[in-house]
Amino acid sequence: MKLRDITGKLFNLIKKKFVFSITLMIIVVFLSLSSLYGYLLFHKLSVIFSIVIMAAIFIIAWKNQGYIKSYVLYFQQEYKIEK
Protein backbone atom coordinates (compact mmCIF):
# COMPACT_ATOMS: atom_id res chain seq x y z
CA MET A 1 0.00 0.00 0.00
CA LYS A 2 1.15 3.45 -0.76
CA LEU A 3 1.26 6.20 1.80
CA ARG A 4 -1.34 8.13 -0.19
CA ASP A 5 -3.82 5.24 0.13
CA ILE A 6 -3.27 4.95 3.87
CA THR A 7 -3.65 8.67 4.48
CA GLY A 8 -6.75 8.75 2.26
CA LYS A 9 -8.41 5.97 4.25
CA LEU A 10 -7.43 7.62 7.53
CA PHE A 11 -8.82 10.96 6.35
CA ASN A 12 -12.12 9.34 5.34
CA LEU A 13 -12.41 7.65 8.74
CA ILE A 14 -11.72 10.91 10.58
CA LYS A 15 -14.19 12.74 8.34
CA LYS A 16 -16.95 10.20 9.05
CA LYS A 17 -16.36 10.40 12.81
CA PHE A 18 -16.31 14.20 12.66
CA VAL A 19 -19.60 14.36 10.75
CA PHE A 20 -21.18 11.91 13.20
CA SER A 21 -19.94 13.95 16.19
CA ILE A 22 -21.22 17.22 14.76
CA THR A 23 -24.61 15.66 13.95
CA LEU A 24 -24.91 14.25 17.46
CA MET A 25 -23.99 17.60 19.01
CA ILE A 26 -26.60 19.39 16.87
CA ILE A 27 -29.26 16.93 18.03
CA VAL A 28 -28.29 17.38 21.69
CA VAL A 29 -28.32 21.19 21.37
CA PHE A 30 -31.70 21.08 19.61
CA LEU A 31 -33.14 18.88 22.38
CA SER A 32 -31.72 21.20 25.03
CA LEU A 33 -33.20 24.28 23.37
CA SER A 34 -36.55 22.56 23.01
CA SER A 35 -36.61 21.99 26.76
CA LEU A 36 -36.52 25.76 27.21
CA TYR A 37 -39.63 26.13 25.03
CA GLY A 38 -41.70 23.52 26.81
CA TYR A 39 -41.47 20.20 28.56
CA LEU A 40 -43.98 18.46 26.31
CA LEU A 41 -42.06 19.28 23.13
CA PHE A 42 -38.79 18.15 24.73
CA HIS A 43 -40.35 14.93 25.94
CA LYS A 44 -41.85 14.09 22.53
CA LEU A 45 -38.59 14.78 20.72
CA SER A 46 -36.51 12.77 23.17
CA VAL A 47 -38.91 9.81 22.94
CA ILE A 48 -38.77 9.92 19.13
CA PHE A 49 -34.97 10.08 19.27
CA SER A 50 -34.79 7.08 21.60
CA ILE A 51 -37.16 5.07 19.37
CA VAL A 52 -34.96 5.81 16.34
CA ILE A 53 -31.86 4.65 18.23
CA MET A 54 -33.67 1.51 19.43
CA ALA A 55 -34.84 0.69 15.90
CA ALA A 56 -31.31 1.15 14.54
CA ILE A 57 -29.88 -1.24 17.14
CA PHE A 58 -32.62 -3.78 16.39
CA ILE A 59 -32.02 -3.60 12.63
CA ILE A 60 -28.26 -4.02 13.07
CA ALA A 61 -28.75 -7.02 15.36
CA TRP A 62 -31.37 -8.57 13.05
CA LYS A 63 -29.24 -8.21 9.92
CA ASN A 64 -26.16 -9.65 11.65
CA GLN A 65 -27.74 -12.58 13.44
CA GLY A 66 -26.05 -15.03 11.07
CA TYR A 67 -22.63 -13.65 12.00
CA ILE A 68 -23.13 -13.44 15.77
CA LYS A 69 -21.08 -16.07 17.60
CA SER A 70 -22.20 -15.02 21.07
CA TYR A 71 -25.77 -15.74 22.05
CA VAL A 72 -26.03 -12.91 24.57
CA LEU A 73 -28.65 -11.18 22.40
CA TYR A 74 -30.79 -14.31 22.39
CA PHE A 75 -30.47 -15.01 26.11
CA GLN A 76 -33.94 -13.84 27.04
CA GLN A 77 -35.58 -15.72 24.18
CA GLU A 78 -33.98 -19.12 24.73
CA TYR A 79 -33.52 -19.27 28.49
CA LYS A 80 -36.65 -18.05 30.20
CA ILE A 81 -36.06 -17.62 33.91
CA GLU A 82 -39.11 -18.54 35.95
CA LYS A 83 -39.70 -17.14 39.40
Image (cartoon, rainbow, N blue to C red):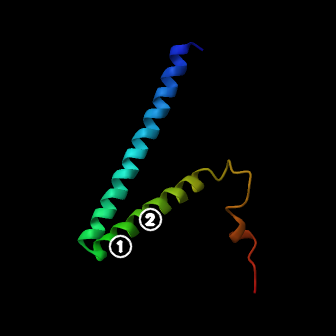
Residue sitting at the far bottom: 83
Nearest the eye: 12 or 34: 34
Please determine whether, in this image, residue 2 is positioned above or below residue 68.
above
Q: Secondary structure at mark 1?
A: helix
Q: On the rendered structure, is 1 left or right of 9? A: right
Residue drawn at the location 37% of the way across and 48% of the way down: 23
Q: Position of residue 3 (x, y in %)?
A: 55, 14
Residue 16 occupies which quadrant of the picture? top left
Mark-to-mark CA distance, 2 and 1? 11 Å
- Judging depth in this view, the residue of 30 and 52 nearest the camera is 30
Residue that badge 2 annotates:
50
The quarter of the picture where residue 40 lies is: bottom left
Q: Nearer the viewer, residue 49 or 11?
A: 11
Mark drawn on residue 19: none
For the C terminus, the quadrant is bottom right
Q: Quadrant of the N terminus?
A: top right
Horizontal side of 79 relative to 26 (left or right) equals right
Q: Position of residue 28 (x, y in %)?
A: 37, 58
Graded by Cα atoms within 10 Å as few (under 14), some (14 to 19) or many (20 or more), the crowding at tag 1 reads some
Q: Hey, what amino acid is under mark 1?
A: His
**Residue at x-position 49% and y-position 56%:** 56
Residue 30 position within the rendered picture, expressed as x and y whole percent measured from the top left: 30, 59
* Residue where numbered disc 1 is placed: 43
Looking at the image, residue 4 sits to the left or right of residue 22; the answer is right
Identify residue type, mark 2: Ser
Residue in the image at 38% along x and 45% along y: 22
